[in-house]
Amino acid sequence: MDARTTATDVESRPANNLLRRLRQADYALLAPHVTVEDSAAGQLLYNPGDDVQVVHFPCGPSLATFLVPNEDGRDVETILVGREGAVGGIVSEGFLPAYTRICVKFGGPFARIHVGKLEAAKLRSPSLRNIFARYADCMLAQIFQSTACNAIHSIEQRTAKWILAAMERTGDESSVPLTHEQLATLLGVGRSYASRVLQSFRAERILDTRRGSILVRSRDGLRQRACLCNDAVKMHFEEVLSGVYPTEEREAG
């Protein structure tokens, strides 16, 4: 970030870490074209094949998710994107079709900019291009890690990982607005499997469930049962795009 960028300058921007990571001069190229609107959970941003015309930046506790449709009619979620990033048209240089379905997972504010305006700004600023290229690398790392995780880790490990990932991105210390059905979609399993895992975690006093949400009783218990995939992604973010991925220490500071 430009040394001349003050804390006040950053705090006046939308509550998205990627936008707040930009140098003041780079953000000034985008600011006139950025709008912020609330989006409800479940809102569809893109279907496969849609022209990607708008980049969406989740702000604060908002989350977006990538879902891959399958021939049996089910959608499988691949990665969550929160205030550390953006979805749609990150590195494209024109209106390219969306490959996956992109939906709002947890509702809230989203900053938005037209792809053409973002591309015009990138042409004027190599440092802006560099930031978005770095973020694309981090997103690719998430996808790689998710693929490996689904192949080798147990449902219990993945459940704990997903809940922790959602908590980190929303900043909520005690609960996640996930239903059994939504968790099953994240895991790519049937609802009954997800319910059995939640029941076992509940028996161990790690979490509890309420209608439409999961209440975390022991974050340490979740960490002990989670795989290390979240940690691997966070380490890559810190190496490639330091200060963007939300962490407990950073949020507390």
Image (spheres, rainbow, N blue to C red):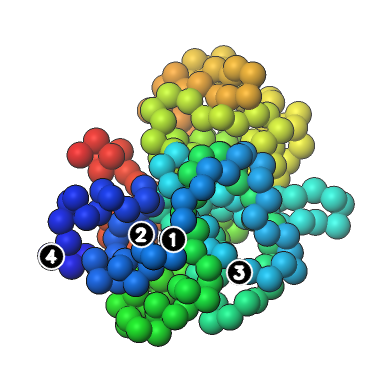
Q: Name the residue under label 2.
A: 19
- Look at the numbered disc 3 and give the secondary structure of its residue: loop
Label 3, label 1: how far apart the Cα atoms are: 14 Å
Q: Which residue lies furthest to the right in this view?
A: 72
Front-lying residue, 147 or 252: 252
For marks 2 and 4 on the same chain, the one whose residue lies earlier in the sequence = 4
The answer to which of marks 3 and 1 sits earlier in the sequence is 1
Distance in Å between CA atoms under marks 4 and 3:
32 Å
Percent position of residue 54, x then y: 57, 65
Say left or right for 52 vs 58. right
Q: For the residue carrying disc 2, how many other residues have a C-alpha within 10 Å: few (<14), some (14-19), or many (20+)?
A: many
x and y percentages locating residue 204 in the rendered image: 52, 17
User: Which residue is disc 1 drawn over?
Assistant: 34
Identify the residue at horizontal 36%, vertical 47% (top origin): 15
Q: Earlier in the sequence, mark 4 or mark 1?
A: 4
Whole-angstrom CA distance, mark 3 to mark 2, is: 18 Å
Return the x and y of residue 215 as percentages of the image width and height.
51, 21
State the residue at coordinates (76%, 37%).
190
Circle 1: element type: loop
Three-letter code for the amino acid on which mark 4 is drawn: Arg
Q: Which amino acid does label 3 sit on?
A: Gln
- Quarter of the figure with residue 201: top right
Q: Which of marks 4 and 3 is nearer the N terminus?
A: 4
Marks 2,1: beta carbons within 8 A: yes
Q: Position of residue 119 (x, y in %)?
A: 47, 78
Please name the residue that numbered disc 4 is placed on: 4
